[in-house]
Amino acid sequence: MADTWLEVPPGSPFPAESLPYGVFSSAPGGAPRVGVAVGAHVLDLAPLLDDTVFGRASLNPFLARGPDAWRATRGLLQDLLGHRSRRDEVARHLIALSDVRLHLPVEVADYVDFYSSLHHAQNLGRMLRPDSEALTPNWRHLPVAYHGRAGTVVVSGTPVVRPRGQRREAGDAGPSLGPSTRLDIEAEVGFVVGVGSEPGRGVAVSAFRDHVFGVVLVNDWSARDIQAWEYVPLGPFLGKSFATSVSAWVLPLEALEAARVPSPRQDPPPLPYLAPGEDWGLDLSLEVALNGDVVARPPFASMYWTPAQQLAHMTVNGAALRTGDLYASGTVSGPAPGQQGSLIELSRNGATPIRLPRSCRTPRLPR
Ligand code: CA
């Protein structure tokens, strides 16, 4: 545990070594601004550090400053929280988490979603294309992805309206339009780009840390009925674009040093521009809960392609990065039962019900 004078409740998701950044507002109608979560509090950075970059309604201006500034700010915060002598100057800028409203932390520039879990790709391939190879021929040679809709990325907790769309289920005489009857979740980890890149110049695997600031949790909501009917030949479209939820907190890469592990062996070895380089496998344990009941624990360390390889691939054609770009890992699914990050996998495409221990309770209807 990092040393701090601040009392951090046991089991808090925000220990002093994490220090994730977010955008919050306090009083009703108060201006959104940048804060850091620690223990049961948000640290109000603009007055504490006397820096207007933290008075803005998104993290983007701070992210654009680059890795030296990210490192210096984190060092300063660790110093302020680590020394009892700094307590008085810090304590008056602590606001209880229970008193704040959280906003989308990043103005999302472009949004890309990968498909980098071998187990997820195999599971989906078997369900969607039962008569052919589970993995497409390109899958082990490049991190497959599509461009999603940046404008519908929302902060976790934002209500999502059930999407309508065109679908055609097996046995239907023709397509029909209506609300999705197979709305799914996808548990993913997203990577937030801080520093952009020049058009025409790819970003090397080794430059990952020069561009990527940190990670968010992502739920790539997916309407399976709409998706299954529309996705050939150009991939996901309206089955995905209605909403993507991200966590309110962006955890800096620096906070993940202890989680770094070798990525799984890649066979065949990828082309040289995708050579894995430094270890950027991340030993993160995700949890998927439905109404409070954990139904899956997907292990991120099982991902086939690393975020550094994904970044190199999405720029190898010369496409430039922008501050605020978000790219997600793809559904995280491990090899064992209970490690799948989507309901279509956990329920074997609806064949096996997912039992919730608490589902027999009488639901409370909102008044
Ligand atoms: Ca996805």
Image (tube, rainbow, N blue to C red):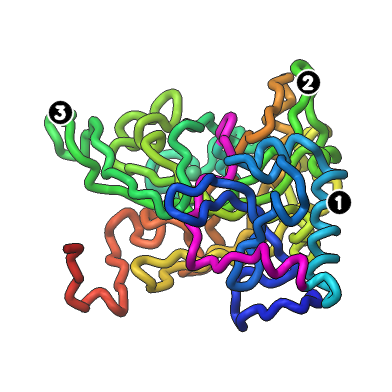
Q: Which residue is mark 3?
A: 174
Q: Residue furthest bottom?
A: 10
Mark 1 Cα within 10 Å, few/some/many (few <14, many 20+)?
A: few
Secondary structure state at the residue bearing disc 2: loop
* Residue 85 in the image, given as x and y percentages of width and height: 85, 75
> Compared with residue 110, is residue 88 higher up or lower down, i.e. above or below?
below
Is 323 in the magenta?
no
Q: Which residue is mark 2?
A: 198
Q: Is mark 2 within 8 Å of ligand 1?
A: no
Q: Residue furthest top?
A: 200
Q: Is residue 120 visible?
A: no
Q: Is mark 1 within 8 Å of ligand 1?
A: no
Residue pictured at 52% horizontal, 68% vertical = 297
Mark 2 Cα within 10 Å, few/some/many (few <14, many 20+)?
A: few
Q: Amino acid at mark 3?
A: Gly
Q: Earlier in the sequence, mark 3 or mark 2?
A: 3
Q: Which residues are magenta?
A: 88-112
* Residue 150 in the image, given as x and y percentages of width and height: 51, 32
Are the two marked residues, 3 and 2, in contact with CB atoms closer than 8 angstroms?
A: no
Q: Earlier in the sequence, mark 1 or mark 3?
A: 1
Residue pictured at 31% horizontal, 48% vertical = 183
Q: CA distance from mark 3 to mark 2?
A: 47 Å
Is 96 in the magenta?
yes
* Residue 225 in the image, given as x and y percentages of width and height: 28, 40
Q: Which residue is mark 1?
A: 72
| Camera-nearest label, 3 or 2 | 2
Instruction: Decide which of 269, 34 is in the foreground and name it.
Output: 34
Q: CA distance from mark 1 to mark 3?
A: 60 Å
Q: Is residue 179 visible?
A: yes
Residue pictured at 50% horizontal, 59% vertical = 100
> Compared with residue 64, is residue 348 higher up or lower down, i.e. above or below?
below
